[in-house]
Amino acid sequence: MQRRDLLKFAGAASALGLGGCAASSSGTAPLIGQANVARVLVVGGGFGGATAAKYVRLLSQYQIDVVLVEPDADFVSCPLSNLVLGGSKAMGDITRPYATLTARHGVRVVRDTVARIDATARTAVLASGATIRYDKLVLSPGVEMIWDDVAGLRAASQQGRILQAWKAGPETAALRRQLETMPDGGVYAIAIPEAPYRCPPGPYERASVVAAYFKAAKPKSKVLILDANEDVTSKGPLFKRVWAESYKGLLEYRPQHKATGVDAATNTVKFEIQDDVRADVLNVLPPMRAGAIAVQTGLANSNARWCNVNWLNFESTAAKNIHVIGDAIQIASLMPKSGHMANSQAKVTAAAIVAELNGWELDPTPMLTNTCYSFVDAQRVVHVASVHAYVAAERTFKPVPGSGGLSPAPNEQEAAYAFGWANTIWADMLA
Ligand SMILES: Cc1cc2nc3c(=O)[nH]c(=O)nc-3n(C[C@H](O)[C@H](O)[C@H](O)COP(=O)(O)OP(=O)(O)OC[C@H]3O[C@@H](n4cnc5c(N)ncnc54)[C@H](O)[C@@H]3O)c2cc1C
């Protein structure tokens, strides 16, 4: 970017009144940010949001004001969180601070929750009452559980009886404690919703590392996978091979088990067709949809679950100047809901936003990449990778034929790659 363009842009933004804070609706609520500077507001500091915040700052040569709103004090990574459940990693290993985003990149991180977005006025109201004016909004709120699809689950989850731990954090530690206190000879069952859901291989990775923990520490115990899908949705042959070779008699896979309800008093899960299953530790994942703020803002215009976007800039098809990325979007063909994909989408979006605010052409041929490592125990990993290119004639992303690949078998070398991947992507987002 040329410095003169940025200056021109900053001046234009000021002259056109693009930047700055709107008066708050109450007239008394605090306002955030300075006037006369173009502002990107990022909602959610996960894989998509943190990356977008940093890259808008970088690609605009620090000329665009970026405010990131996130309720959590630190970033806690879902990737590698299954290793906390397996006992080979601790919460501190998957937790990183937001401080460097501010210190090094000048992102203003506001610890709060966006309660309401007014797409017409281009303002967001925070739970604390503050109002933030934006020129562009990046929404990366992750997923929300559709509690009502599994009767009794919301209450059982709120009571801490039947957990999900599908957003890494306190629930990850709580589920680990349930596994630790479970007696040897007990049963851990994970129920998987129909795809699409966050991280297709995640539940199978979790079942595998919990089985590895049981094998070493509680060998009379059992892992049950209760899957609403017809078959394993990701890396199927690799996982099945590990289950047959390493966890025979310890791990059982049951397809076509769609959970419809739970009974927290008896720790039982009920299904559409099959008999109820009782387990000592129940980990029930309901169907998922775009994070609540996306649904509430009217952006979930694909089956009332996911957000349709224009693939060239990830702008919502329901609201101008709101760019939705990460797990919340309606995916293109074979596009996973993964942290790597959210990070990749964030960079395309950041570049598009910087271009649009400068009046430049959008990149007509954006590319996205994905690599997903799954642990099958504390030492061995399998991966799947893909490259996705924008196909102008069809206005969508498609996997590039011949790109990517799959591990031939679980192996220890890829565990080193997986840790390297995690450290690199966390640094790419936050450092
Ligand atoms: C067990 C598990 C293992 C996984 N393993 C991998 C892996 O190995 N590789 C991989 O690539 N992916 C993996 N994933 C998937 C990955 O974690 C997600 O795809 C990724 O987090 C999506 O990024 P996101 O930005 O959409 O959502 P998130 O990372 O969840 O970030 C959303 C953020 O938005 C915040 N937020 C929500 N609503 C609001 C609001 N109203 N106001 C302000 N903030 C808000 C939330 O607090 C949250 O921090 C795994 C997931 C799980 C559960």
Image (cartoon, rainbow, N blue to C red):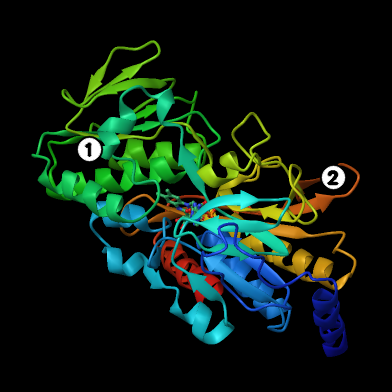
Image quadrant where residue 271 sits: top left
* Residue situated in front as seen by the camera: 428 or 187: 428
Label 1 Cα neighbours within 10 Å, binned few <14 / some 14-19 / many ≥20? few
* Residue 154 point in image, percent of width and height: 33, 32
Residue 147 is tagged as none
Q: Secondary structure at mark 2?
A: loop
* Residue situated in front as seen by the camera: 84 or 325: 325
Picture residue at 68% right of the left edge, 35% below the top:
301
Name which residue type carries label 1: Gln
Is 125 situated left or right of 176 in this image?
Answer: right
Picture residue at 48% right of the left edge, 26% below the top:
229
Q: Is residue 269 above or below residue 237?
A: above
Picture residue at 16% right of the left edge, 32% below the top:
280
Name which residue type carries label 2: Arg
Is 130 situated left or right of 321 in this image?
Answer: left
* Residue 10 point in image, percent of width and height: 80, 81
Q: What residue would you read off at disc 1?
A: 159
Q: Residue furthest left?
A: 183
Q: Is residue 33 visible?
A: yes
Image quadrant where residue 268 sits: top left
